[in-house]
């Protein structure tokens, strides 16, 4: 399940890294196990979010990729090569940005979901305020993320864009 930590490969000076997040695995097996478990839970939630409007897909998939990058190179590569989630993850890892369409869909779905949740708990003002604060902070964070559309990434993401 977990691979041993590989020896670090040092590129020659001036050579850009192909994948900035593919640093070496964490040295501690216990931490790698914890990261792998967290990544797996995030991946399950992200996949569920593709079908349930209440759960966001993109943040959970990015969290899973970050956890797998330090816990399991095999799982990280599988996510990077996934036809639906891979382009979004590669865009995040290479440019620390998300595609404009992904951002718009994520913010729209979050607004609709939180709005519906606020309506459902309309008798609990404190819960409505908490949901509103969460929506405002996450929405502001996401809105401020840089947008980047890499033609290579964009073309490969059309069939099943991980936009939610």
Image: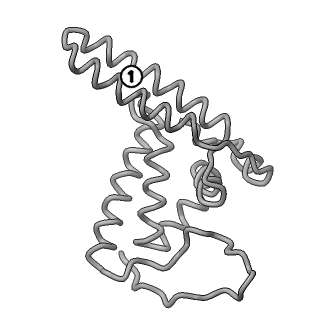
* Residue 26 x %, y %: 39, 77
Q: Is residue 119 left or right of residue 6?
A: left
Locate the N terminus and report the quarter of the image it occupies: bottom left
Identify whether 22 is placed above or below 79. below
Q: Is residue 56 above or below residue 30?
A: above
Residue 109: percent from left, percent from top: 50, 26
> Which residue occupies 77% across, 47% down?
155
Badge 1 density bin: few <14, some 14–19, many ≥20, Cα 10 Å: some
Q: Residue at x 28, y 13 (%)?
A: 120
Q: Position of residue 4 (x, y in %)?
A: 39, 85
In the picture of the structure, the residue carrying the numbered disc 1 is 114
Q: Name the residue nearer the viewer: 29 or 143.
A: 143
Looking at the rendered structure, the number of numbered marks drawn on it comes to 1
Q: Secondary structure at mark 1?
A: helix
Q: Residue at x 23, y 21 (%)?
A: 127
Which sits in the foreground, 143 or 52?
143
Q: Quadrant of residue 161?
A: top right
In the foreground, 20 or 136 = 136
């Amino acid at each position: 399940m977990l691979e041993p930590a590989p020896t670090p490969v040092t590129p020659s000076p001036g050579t850009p890294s192909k994948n900035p997040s593919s640093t070496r695995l964490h040295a501690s097996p216990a931490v790698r196990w914890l990261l792998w478990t967290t990544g797996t839970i995030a991946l399950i939630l992200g996949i569920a979010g593709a079908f349930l409007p209440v759960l966001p897909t993109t943040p959970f998939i990015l969290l899973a990729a970050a956890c797998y990058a330090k816990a399991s190179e095999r799982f990280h590569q599988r996510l990077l090569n996934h036809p639906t989630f891979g382009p979004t993850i590669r865009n995040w890892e290479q440019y620390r940005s998300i595609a404009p369409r992904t951002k718009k869909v994520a913010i729209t779905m979050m607004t609709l979901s939180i709005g519906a949740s606020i309506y459902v708990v309309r008798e609990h003002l404190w819960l409505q305020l908490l949901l509103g604060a969460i929506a405002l902070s996450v929405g502001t964070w996401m809105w401020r993320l840089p947008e980047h559309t890499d033609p290579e990434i964009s073309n490969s993401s059309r069939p099943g864009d991980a936009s939610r």
